[in-house]
Image: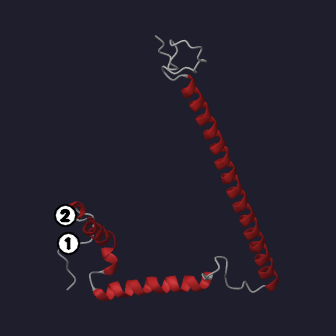
Amino acid sequence: MNTAIIKPQWSPLTIGLMVLGFVLFWPLGLAVLAYIMWGEKFGGSPEKAQRYFNQGKAWCTSNKSRHGFSGNRYASTSSGNAAFDDYRAEQLRRLEEERARLDAEIEDFHEYMANLNKAKDREEFDRFMNDRRGSRQGYTEPKPDNGDQTNNGWGNNG
């Protein structure tokens, strides 16, 4: 007997349950969405779900060995032609050297731009401080004291 109360298909009931699941607790909504999209593949039985999982696992394992995923990102199985394999290894080594050189140039450029921005910021700050010193309210350069009590050095002589 292979009947389910809620079928894994797009219906007003399943859409409503999905929205309600997202509102109440987002993983519940995600589970309902997964059931709607992939529920037919599992067929509602644990055996079918396990078989589907094993097929996916076997596919990943076979592709992993076929494409040679290992510590080296360019490692792969032999093509069967030693001359081509040597040529490919040499080209990949050359590309890695070129990438390292370009990465070093990028780092040097970023350092240059940082120094340029620091110099520009320092110049703007010095200009600001000079303008601020020159435009302070009530501040004037002290005049030499000639025994005259009218200059107190603060610009409010009086």
Instruction: Give residue 91's quadrant in the image.
Output: bottom right
* Circle 1 residue: 6
Could you tell me residue 75's position as x and y percent?
67, 81
Q: Residue at x 35, y 87 (%)?
A: 50
78, above or below 100, in the image: below
Please tell me which residue lies in front, 76 or 149.
149
Please tell me which residue lies in front, 147 or 138.
147
Is the Cβ of the residue at disc 2 closer than 8 Å to that at disc 1? Answer: yes
Q: Residue at x 60, y 14 (%)?
A: 146
How packed is label 1: few (under 14 Cα within 10 Å), some, or many (20 or more)? few
Assign a secondary structure to mark 1: loop
Q: Mark 2 belongs to which amino acid? A: Leu
Assign a secondary structure to mark 2: helix
Instruction: For marks 2 and 1, give the CA distance.
Output: 8 Å
Q: Mark 1 belongs to which amino acid? A: Ile
39, above or below 48, in the image: above
Q: Residue at x 46, y 85 (%)?
A: 57
Please tell me which residue lies in front, 10 or 135.
135
Instruction: Give residue 70's quadrant in the image.
Output: bottom right
Could you tell me residue 110's position as x and y percent?
66, 53
25, above or below 55, in the image: above
Could you tell me residue 56's position as x and y percent?
45, 82
Q: Residue at x 78, y 85 (%)?
A: 81
Instruction: Give residue 87's quadrant in the image.
Output: bottom right
Sequence-first disc among 2 and 1: 1
* Circle 2 residue: 13
> Residue extending furthest right?
83
Could you tell me residue 19's position as x and y percent?
23, 60
Q: Quadrant of the N terminus?
A: bottom left
> Residue extending furthest front?
147
